[in-house]
Amino acid sequence: MTVAALLALALGTYAFRLTGPLLHGRVELSARIQQLLSTGAAVLLVALAATSALTGAHGFAGWARPLGVLAGGVLAWRRAPFVIVVLVAAGVTALLRAASLR
Amino acid sequence: MRSLFRTAGHRLLRDVALVCLADGVVGVSFGALAVAGGLPVWLPVVMSLVVFAGASQFSAVGVALAGGGPIAAVATPLLLNTRTVPFSLAVADVLGKRPLTRLCGAHLVTDETAAFALAQPDPARRRAAFWTCGLSLYATWNVCVAAGALAGKALGDTGAFGLDAAYPAVLLALVVPTLRDAGTRRAALAGAAVALAATPVLPPGLPVLLALTGLLATGRRS
């Protein structure tokens, strides 16, 4: 990761955040665009969750990580608090590895 | 600052503290994973200060650690952050009137601060909620990422603590409320299937971008 890439990410992100204060009162996003942005974000987040849960540098990530993430995901679906979701996912994965399940 | 906290109220302060606790855990895991993966300590620390968006930071570092190119390492996290556009429009009125305050406030627009602000019933409390949550979260996130980065070398094998499961779990926790909508769920599942199928054959970072084809599976428009 180069410094130029880091700067591009920081400036781009800040530009998105500035659109509200800059355009406030002048532009309304149409319902269609808002829907598309929100569905697009959901698609990216789920794809990232799936690939980062299941795959590593050398293909399949092994069973411990996806099972831990699955436990966290079930708790999230049942509206558990954010911190519980994260701690359970990490905890289950750590326990499975301690029990020598990769 | 004290009057801000008074307007915010006890219940809000407790909720903000809980979100800070959760994001703190995630921040530690982000710093530790980045450094354990071989990045220098300053990179996750500076990135947290200037980007301040958890999911996109993880994806940038993930692509970088997997050996992806700079374009892929920037494109995916930037696309993820397009969701701050509607948020920043929604909270624009709570950022205040002074140009400098607005410029600083804009940097604090995240999923969490927007959600807290928009849940409040009147403008004064929206403003108090946004700034209380934003400033607390900015402080917590950066301190915890730095702590995680410094601990990353000492921890050694972060896998033994299951830290690699924290990031996907965070993403799921973020996205689950929107998945209760059937159209969004179809699009997300189709996108994830495309990304997983493409992972063995495409360079790191690109499969997730390809997942956007899942939008075609949304079906109805509301």
Image (cartoon, coloured by chain):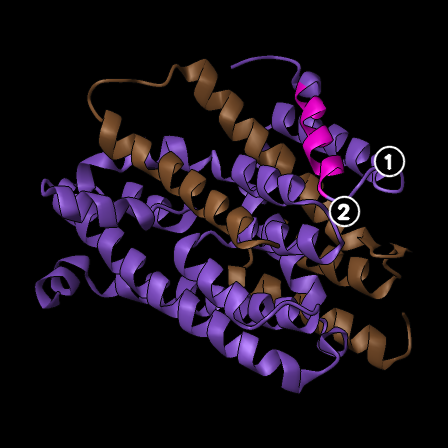
Q: Picture coordinates of residue A78 (x, y %)? A: 61, 52
- What is the three-letter code of the residue carrying label 2? Thr
Q: Picture coordinates of residue A30 (x, y %)? A: 39, 14
Q: Is residue A23 left or right of residue B24?
A: left
Q: Which mark is residue A51?
A: 2
Secondary structure at badge 2 equals: helix
Q: Say which quarter of the image contains residue B70.
A: top right
Q: Picture coordinates of residue B139 (x, y %)? A: 34, 68
Badge 2 crowding class, 10 Å Cα cut-off, few under 14, some 14 to 19, many 20 or more, is many
Q: Which mark is residue A52?
A: none
The colour assigned to chain A within the rendered structure: brown
Secondary structure at badge 1 equals: helix
Residue A41 seen anywhere in this rendered image of the structure: yes
Q: Picture coordinates of residue B185 (x, y %)? A: 66, 31
Residue A76 seen anywhere in this rendered image of the structure: no
| For residue B31, above or below residue B78 | below
Question: Cα distance, mark 1 to mark 2?
Answer: 10 Å
Give the residue drawn at x 40%, y 50%.
Answer: B112
- What is the three-letter code of the residue carrying label 1? Ala
Badge 1 crowding class, 10 Å Cα cut-off, few under 14, some 14 to 19, many 20 or more, is some
Q: Which residue is mark 1?
A: B197
Q: In this view of the protein, which residue sits in the foreground, B153 or B210?
A: B153
| For residue B34, above or below residue B178 | below
Give the residue drawn at x 69%, y 69%.
Answer: B38
In the image, the chain rendered in purple is B
Quadrant containing the N terminus of chain B is bottom left
Q: Is residue B213 covered in magenta?
A: yes
Q: Main secondary structure of the magenta part?
A: helix
